[in-house]
């Protein structure tokens, strides 16, 4: 070993010695103590929780009349158009059924036959009273009058029916929703002439599953949405028989009677919301307080004695966007954690947010005595003085 190597080795030893001595003489801690996490808690409350379901419904009037011709014919006159309001008894249209004239001829013939039979009976009555004809012959004249009267009555009914078939009037007061006829049109019994909706309330009908149907009662409120506006309706009919094609149940809700029919036109589709599930007066906590682990539900409760957290398994029920039903695992006096972080777990030491604010107030007041100000700290003078 040469002299130069000995010198370098000595220098290294000296440097290492200084480093070890400096570490041994340093009395400051390696890391500062970490403060306990600050948390917020709440206690369970009694609440009603409802779950709504969005559906699509169809608007229809509470009273509606669909008018079809009873016989085929040519439209001679049209007195209405879509969008007009008609009164009960107003003329709608006339249809030439080609049967009115025949019915009128039959009525005239029956009337003449009845008149002749009555005249014959009148003359034979004089002869019968004087013994000129037998009772049997006189009875035949009486029967002829009776038969002529029946024929006349039948002809009159037929004529009146033909008139009603050819001259259409509005059966109710309402709005002409649809008018499918024009002058000179040929119509048959399958052709819809017009639709008249009554001036009463609008009705929204919709279909639901059996589970949802079992939650709906007459008098329940629904919310109807149309063109960005919301309207309220009241359920008044709940079908107890499922539709044979869909297996769904029809529900009807009546809207406000003062609502203009142009707001919810007949036949239009609307979005609506109904309560599909609900519970009343149940224990509930904020929905974000529940955590899930291995398919089980848990919450953290705050233990005042040790200022620590306990992980508690709970059984949950119905929930909405804000609250969740707690069926077991908690008492109303329990303090349930509403904040969470990865630092928290069973037995974790924590501080409540209120305690943290009080401590901060003292620190800030002390800072204020050294010449600084803080508006937030000054808003709680009682805590600062303590």
Image (spheres, rainbow, N blue to C red):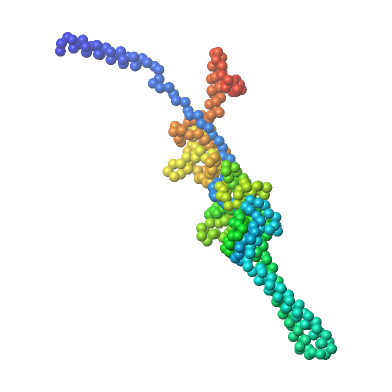
Image quarter of residue 331: top right
Residue 174 relative to residue 358: left or right: right
317 versus 4 height, above or below: below
Residue at horizontal 55 percent and vertical 54 percent from the top: 207
Along the line of sight, the residue nearer the viewer: 196 or 264:
196
How far across and down, in percent of the image, does residue 198 sit? 66, 54
170 versus 300 height, above or below: below
37 versus 132 height, above or below: above
- The number of numbered discs placed on residues in the rendered structure image is 0
How far across and down, in percent of the image, does residue 101 sit? 66, 69
How far across and down, in percent of the image, does residue 105 sit? 68, 72
Quadrant (top left/top right/bottom left/bottom right) for the C terminus: top right
Residue at horizontal 52 percent and vertical 43 percent from the top: 329
Along the line of sight, the residue nearer the viewer: 223 or 323:
223
Image quarter of residue 239: bottom right
Residue at horizontal 47 percent and vertical 38 percent from the top: 311
Any part of residue 296 in sight: yes
Residue at horizontal 59 percent and vertical 60 percent from the top: 185
Residue 91 relative to residue 318: left or right: right
Quadrant (top left/top right/bottom left/bottom right) for the N terminus: top left
């Amino acid at each position: 070993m040469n002299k130069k190597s000995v010198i370098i080795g000595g220098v290294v030893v000296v440097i290492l010695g200084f480093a070890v001595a400096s570490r041994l003489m340093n009395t400051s801690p390696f890391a500062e103590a970490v403060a306990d996490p600050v948390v917020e808690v709440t206690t369970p409350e009694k609440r009603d929780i409802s779950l709504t379901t969005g559906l699509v419904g169809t608007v229809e009037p509470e009273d509606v009349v669909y008018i079809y011709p009873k016989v085929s014919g040519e439209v001679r006159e049209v007195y209405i158009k879509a969008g007009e309001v008609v009164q009960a008894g107003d003329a709608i249209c006339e249809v030439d059924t080609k049967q009115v004239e025949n019915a009128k001829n039959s009525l005239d013939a029956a009337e003449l036959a009845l008149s002749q039979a009555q005249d014959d009976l009148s003359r034979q009555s004089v002869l019968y009273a004087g013994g000129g004809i037998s009772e049997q012959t006189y009875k035949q004249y009486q029967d002829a009058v009776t038969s002529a009267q029946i024929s006349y009555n039948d002809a009159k009914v037929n004529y009146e029916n033909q008139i009603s078939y050819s001259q259409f009037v509005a059966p109710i007061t309402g709005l002409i929703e649809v008018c499918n006829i024009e002058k000179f049109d040929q119509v048959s019994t399958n052709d819809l002439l017009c639709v008249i909706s009554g001036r009463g309330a609008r009705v929204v009908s919709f279909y639901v599953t059996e589970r949802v149907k079992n939650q709906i009662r007459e008098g329940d409120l629904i919310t109807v949405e149309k063109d960005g506006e919301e309207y309220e309706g009241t359920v008044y009919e709940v079908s107890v028989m499922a539709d044979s094609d869909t297996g769904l149940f029809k529900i009807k809700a009546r809207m406000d009677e003062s609502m203009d029919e142009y707001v919810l036109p007949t036949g239009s589709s609307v979005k609506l919301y109904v309560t599909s599930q609900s519970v009343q007066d149940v224990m509930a906590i904020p929905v974000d307080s529940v955590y899930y682990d291995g398919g089980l539900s848990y919450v953290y409760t705050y233990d005042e004695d040790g200022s620590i957290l306990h992980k508690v398994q709970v059984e949950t029920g119905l929930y909405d966007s804000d609250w969740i039903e707690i069926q077991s695992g908690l008492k109303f006096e329990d303090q349930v954690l509403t904040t969470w972080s990865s630092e928290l777990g069973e037995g974790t030491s924590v501080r409540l947010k209120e305690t943290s604010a009080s401590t901060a107030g003292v620190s800030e007041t002390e800072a204020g005595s050294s010449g600084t100000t803080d508006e937030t700290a000054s808003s709680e003078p009682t805590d600062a003085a303590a």
